[in-house]
Amino acid sequence: MIIAPYAYTEFIDGLTAQVKKNIIPMSRIDDAVYRILRVKFTMGLFESPYADPSLAGELGKKEHRELAQEAVRKSLVLLKNGKSAYTPLLPLPKKAGKILVAGSHADNLGNQCGGWTITWQGLTGNNNTAGTTILSAIKSTVDSSTQVVFSENPDKAAVDRGKYDYAIVVVGEPPYAETLGDNLNLTIPAPGPSVIKTVCKSVKCVVVLISGRPLVLEPYIGAIDAFVAAWLPGTEGQGVADALFGDYGFSGKLGHTWFKSVDQLPMNVGDKHYDPLFPFGFGLTTEAKK
């Protein structure tokens, strides 16, 4: 079984030629076919090869979305909470005068989902699937008296005159899959860095990063009050708001080391010069508000 949708005839010709020349032994082909057939027989695909269309209405049911929302909450990793241990920013108060939500990923389901969603490379925007953006989740979570202002890329003057109680900045990577996601710099795509600098210089801020991997943070982490690695939370952005506002506590831990610079890569626990920004297994915790 091979993924070669646009060049399968060339693949078949090449593989056949290599088998005939004994470059690839026939036993290797037999083994691959045997393992594929074993799974298909076990799944009953030869008796019932197609999905039951009557079950289509089960997709996206309330209980499924609730489970996805729980997965989001548990996968979030809180990497910074306050510029000192004595002044944590999270959980955020739901009741405030006015708050700012900024960034390219605050109101974008496609960006939350990443690649391999609906299409191979994924799609940006809110017209591809149903779900809850982080912005809409924030609006539904805060107190009804709290004014929520959204600006994807606010300028300094607007931030300064806004007199915000705090800001939530949501930035990250666009959707990608496979080679098209290759990135030798691993930097936060523009205008993410400038949004972080503009907002966090003037307002207490929590930055939520939407990404499929760790990205370079060191130039900005000092200016950020709180930082959350949200990975690719998918359609249920409410899970992010659940943790930001303390309906649930943060509990996630890093499944791999978070580097300071790409020059350090590859870097693994036990390396002689192991000097990460955040080590493997790191993650701050918070308690849910009573």
Image: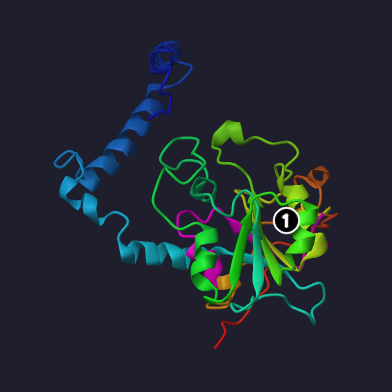
The three-letter code of the residue at mark 1 reads: Trp
User: Residue 18 in the image: x percent, y percent?
Assistant: 45, 14
Q: Nearer the viewer, residue 267 or 102?
A: 102
In the image, residue 68 lies at what x, y percent?
42, 62
Q: Seen in the image, is 208 located left or right of residue 122? A: right
Is 178 located above or below residue 43 in the figure? above
Q: Quadrant of the N terminus?
A: top left
Is residue 207 shown to the viewer in this render? yes
Left or right of 189 in this view: 19? left
What residue is shown at x 74% (from left), y 44% (from top)?
A: 187
Q: Residue at x 41, y 28 (%)?
A: 2
Neighbor class of circle 1 (other Cα within 10 Å; few <14, some 14-19, many 20+) is many
149 part of magenta stretch:
no
- The number of numbered badges drawn on the structure is 1
- Compared with 289, 122 (above or below) is above
Asked whether residue 267 appears in the rendered view, the answer is: no
Quadrant for residue 254, please give it: bottom right
**Label 1: which residue?**
258
Viewer-nearest residue: 235 or 157: 157
Q: Outermost residue, left direction?
A: 47
Q: Identify which residue is drawn at 46% across, 41% down.
A: 116
Nearer-the-camera pick, 287 or 23? 287
- Residue 113 drawn at (x, y percent): 50, 49
| Residue in the image at 42% along x and 22% along y | 25
Instruction: Determine whether the residue tagged by mark 1 lies in a helix, strand or loop.
Output: loop
| Nearest the eye: 11 or 278 | 278
Q: Which residues are magenta?
A: 220-242
Please determine whether, in this image, residue 21 is positioned above or below residue 266. Answer: above
Give the quarter of the figure containing the C terminus. bottom right
- Residue 118 in which image quadrant: top left
